[in-house]
Image (cartoon, rainbow, N blue to C red):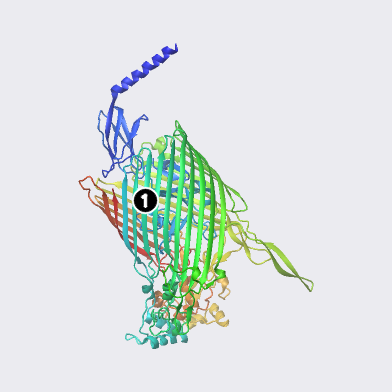
Amino acid sequence: MKIGIKFLTFCILMTHLAVFAQNGISVSGTVIDEGGQPLPGASIIIKGTTTGTQTDFDGLYVLNDVPSDGTLVISYIGYSSQEILVNGQSTIDISLSEDSQTLDEVVVVGYGTQKKADLTGSITTIKTEDITRTPTSAAMQSLQGKVAGLQVVSSGAPGTGPTIRVRGIGSYVGGASDPLYVVDGTFFDDIDFLNTEDIETISVLKDASASAIYGVRAANGVVLIETKSGKINQKPEITYNGYQGVQIAQNVVTLSNSEQFATLARESGSAAEAQSIENAIQRYGRSRINPNVPDVNTDWYDLILRHALQQNHSIGVAGGTEAVTYSLGLNYFEQEGILNMKNEYQRFNIRSKVNVDITDRLDIGISTLFSNATSYRPENTAFALAYYATPTMPVLDTSKTDAYPKPYANAQDLGYRGTQNPFPIMENTENRDKIRNTLTTVDLNYQLVQDKLTLKTAFYHNFETTETREVRLPYFFGNGNAFRENAELVKRNATFSEQTWDNTLTYDDSYGKHNLTALVGTSYRDRSYEQLEAKGLNFPNGPGIGDESYFLDLAKTIDVDGVGDDGLRQYFFSYFGRIAYNFDSKYLLYGTFRADGTSKYQEKWGYFPTVGVGWVVSEESFLENSNVIDFLKLRASWGELGNANVAASTGGITSTEVDAAFGDVRYPGLVTSSDFEALKWEVTAETNVGLTTRLFDNKLTIDSDYYVRETRDAVIPVSRLLVPGETRQNVGVIRNSGFEIVANWNQKVSDNFSFSVGGNFSTLDNEVLDLAGQENLTSGGDTAQRTVVGGTINPFFGLKVDGVYQTDEEILSDPAAQAAIANGLTVAPGDLKFVDQNGDMVIDAQDRVDLGSYLPTYSFGFNFGMNYKAWDFNLNVIGQGGNVIANQKRFAIRQTPDANIDRDFAVNRWNGAGSTNSYPSARGIRNPWSNQFLSSFFVEKGDFVRLQNVTLGYTLPKLNSKFNPDIRFYITAERPLTFFNYNGFTPEVSDGRDTQTYPIPGVYTFGVNIKI
């Protein structure tokens, strides 16, 4: 019986094979892109089966036993799939069109990937072509204006990365609102060491459901960076990308010239200032154009700033076979600073990533990245000195024969209090850092069940060293005025090491219309930091700036107070899991959970859940035949995250002497109290609702989100009972909420012309909900900031200006001015007039009010791109508003009455009744009657609109030869135009307090891309 069944089964199988053999044919061809380039690794599958193949290096394929009436499905990541009827053809060539909006596109999420169509959270991904368009050393700078809800505050100093905020600030502690960076699975506090050419994608995880898988590091958002990899069956591809450019300082503040400065000095009412002008005339001669001023007119900004070069060169090699993929990269970046001193940044990077399939179930990946950078930091005090320096003084005074090493001019010789000249500091100071980063990753993937259950173990090691050398050489102004007497050398060596071991088990399967992905994992991190520094004094004369022969052994004196040895070590262990389920690609459910343990805090463990749901409305029958809506998804999520960026627990027991009186007898005593700060991580709960849609044959894409992010257990200072001082406690509550929308239109008009246009807009409402019963928190010193319940974090706090006193009669009729005069103050026409907020007819601290926040309430970006034949063009515009900037450099004039000031004030100052009701007089700004308080005159709007980037490229036509590289030339203007009203170099000031920020230059480059 068994033999008969086996024979029958054999006959049936042979019959089917014979039928298939009769119907099957061999099909071959090539798969290329729209530009005619082969697509290695493209998939060709017989529809309705699992039978298929992939293209080789040259985009060629051969597929046997194809039914002559069958259908081939051709697909490639990032391109629109095609279905082609065989119709008995033996040769079928296919051209695929790029489709950046395809719903099958896979995006990177925490510890894995997910189809874009299945996302329930808020994630924005920027690809390599948009990243490399920005000529910068800092990868995050390239995201400015391209991600809704992401604030990027630029920095102009060479090698310095921008300040990054995702959906506002949720912490009162400075620096605790930075996002987490994850590079190929490794955690970083910043990614300034990365070469932008090595990055494949940057994904910004903005809401809790997207970020919570990272637990206590994710409260401020997560930035995932995937570096470039080779592809299966990819022919070796060699690329070169390089540019040379020049940086030019933009929006340089115009300072008062000698004539304006002399006028201000004489109008100030100060005999000493007027005499200083006469001293300058006697010392440097009288101007032939205006005999009332000296024959010197120094533009200090023009002298301390320079045009600076910038260059970048990257070489990459990528490829793969059936079993091995590889990607290698070399990069050299160099940037001079626009400050005219030893101020520059150089970086050399080398990167490799190799993945090997050992068997059909086991693969191993190894990647390394080494970065070696040298940074010469600027002397930022030079900008403030140049702002205040008198234009009636030259840089060098040849009459100072006893000055060293140059005859630097000294404002004290003219009767001023300070030396003012910025060049001695600039030319005799060096701040050098040598920074080396090494990142090594080894990961192993084993499919326990083929294509269903995968075990991954990964080890990451990040090692960083920083060698700091700060040199201060002596200089003398002569005439017995020694300003820096001794040569100083500070040496500081710091090492940072972080080791991470992650283990995950991922299950991925489908049952009919049910699709499930589940992940569980553990993570162990061990991070340590050590720093050793020393300071030497009194070096022998000889070596100058840039000379390597300065060593501490040469110092005659070692400053004991300058010796330090510090370090720390922290451990983290975590359990985490994720479930992603969808039914019929229509109803989506997503959830994560993470338990984090740490040695950093007294409370060792934290638990962070999240859940997300989605409904793909376009899959419903009532939208099935829509000619407008191609895809429509509603999504919502909630989750909790932690912020471990706040400091660890510190403090101890203190005793304070107190006196108590009983009757008429005084009794001394002690009050013992603890200032121990038993801190823990801050916890953020976030709710996000959103909509994603594709319209008009996927030409128009729209993503919108509304979120509420509430941080409880925020660390704030709390006053101690009975004794002075304060401790930090987890008792504050801060809320950020806002709306974000992104829209893009992409259209291919013809084979020769395509274009895209889009934009994003976001709002931010920051509010403090609880200060543990305290009336307010005050900080900021002179430019005071006060936080109150119902307001924003750290808004500026001062007097409200209500115009300018025009006449003596107006002063006589103002009770507040009369009260000030009665108290011995001088109030005169040209002085600012302040609002008496409480109506007590006295201007004092009780009249101070909220003057605005440094956090923008809205931001936006606009982009346009087009391709016409061999030409490509891209344009980006960004902007923000609703924030203010405290012009602290101007505010400090009240304490330095002999200093210069910007031309804007000199031209618009009050100089007589009716001349202006907005600016005070020269006397009024230098000696205001309420000069101890910040006022709204010094707090200006920070709104701006900037033409961020313009790029024009041309690709050379192909040569009719075997050697046929792609060559593209391009020119770029980065930040060529910025429109704003703030009286400073830039409206981008991270904390809103402008003490004279390093200018952000425009960058103009010419470059070439070559692909072989």
Outermost top residue: 1
- The residue indicated by pointer 1 is 329
- Say which residue appears at 45% left-offset and 75% top-offset: 541
Along the viewing direction, whichever of 956 and 80 lies nearer the viewer:
956
Q: Which x, y percent locates residue 874? A: 31, 54
Outermost left residue: 960
The image quadrant that residue 434 belongs to is bottom left
Along the viewing direction, whichever of 282 and 319 lies nearer the viewer:
319
Q: Kindly tell me whether residue 302 is visible in this rendering.
A: yes
Along the viewing direction, whichever of 57 and 941 lies nearer the viewer:
57
Q: How many labels does the image show?
A: 1
In the rendered image, the quadrant that contains the N terminus is top left
Say left or right for 639 vs 747: right
Question: Measured along the vertical axis of the image, is residue 617 above or below residue 206?
Answer: above
Q: Which x, y percent locates residue 395? A: 39, 79
Label 1: which secondary element: strand
Say left or right for 25 vs 581: left
Q: Kindly tell me whether residue 758 is visible in this rendering.
A: no
Outermost bottom residue: 282
The amino acid type of the residue labelled 1 equals Gly
- Say which residue appears at 54% left-offset and 58% top-offset: 530
Q: Which x, y percent locates residue 866? A: 29, 52
Q: Which x, y percent locates residue 544? A: 42, 72
Say left or right for 875 vs 478: left
